[in-house]
Amino acid sequence: MKLKSEKKLTSRSAAEVFSFLSDMNNYKRLMPDQVTDWNSTTDHCEFNITGAGKISMDILERAPISEIRMSGRAASTVQFKMNCSIISENESSVVQWFLEAELNPFLESLASKPLQNFLDGLANRYAA
């Protein structure tokens, strides 16, 4: 399963976006209402998503000012890779989230909508 958010324009520079999103502690402010039990460090976060279960992820790589790559830990209900792409647009930037997970058809049917909502929520909350 591959999901992506819409591209969202923000008035923040790519450097500002990258700095904020490089710290998992900041993600709590971007979480949708269905996220509970938040716990984080700079490189790791854990939380529950109603309808999708426990999510535990780490930042794997930071490509300065352009991309942040994350991956789910074994403790997650869903195993996945997630990337945030940051594109500089003069003094603003465009942010888009991508998620890739290998799920059986039953789990995919249950988790795809909550995970898509999660990605869209990240993009919308950051761009606001």
Image: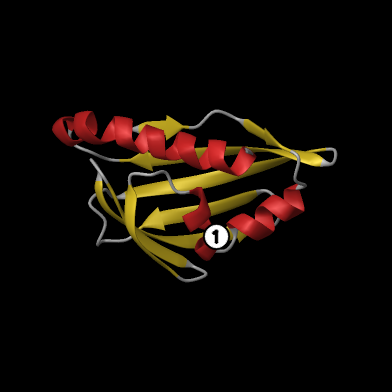
Q: Quadrant of the N terminus?
A: top left
Q: Which residue in the structure is indicated by mark 1?
A: 26
Residue 49 x %, y %: 30, 47
Q: Quadrant of residue 19?
A: bottom right
Residue 124 pos. (x, y %): 55, 36
Q: Is residue 79 above or below residue 44?
A: above
Does 122 sit left or right of 10 as displayed? Answer: left
Q: Nearer the viewer, residue 6 or 66?
A: 6
Secondary structure state at the residue bearing disc 1: helix
Q: Quadrant of residue 2?
A: top left
Image quadrant containing the C terminus: top right
68 vs 12, nearest the viewer:
12
Report the number of discs. 1
Colour option used: secondary structure
Q: Classify mark 1: residues with Cα within 10 Å, few (<14), some (14-19) or many (20+).
A: some
Residue 77's x, y, as percent?
22, 51
Farthest residue in the right direction? Answer: 90
Residue at x 23%, y 40% (from the top left corner): 51
Q: Is residue 118 left or right of residue 11?
A: left
The answer to whether residue 50 is above or below residue 59 is: above
Task: Check the image and report above or below for 21 versus 86.
Answer: below
Q: Is residue 11 left or right of residue 3?
A: right
Q: Amino acid at mark 1?
A: Asn
The residue at the point 23 percent across, 38 percent down is 103
Asked if residue 63 shows in the view, the reply is: no
* Residue at point 38%, 33% (across, down): 116
State the image quarter where residue 21 is shown: bottom right
The x, y position of residue 33, in whole percent, is 38, 44
Residue that extends furthest to the bottom in the rendered view of this protein: 41
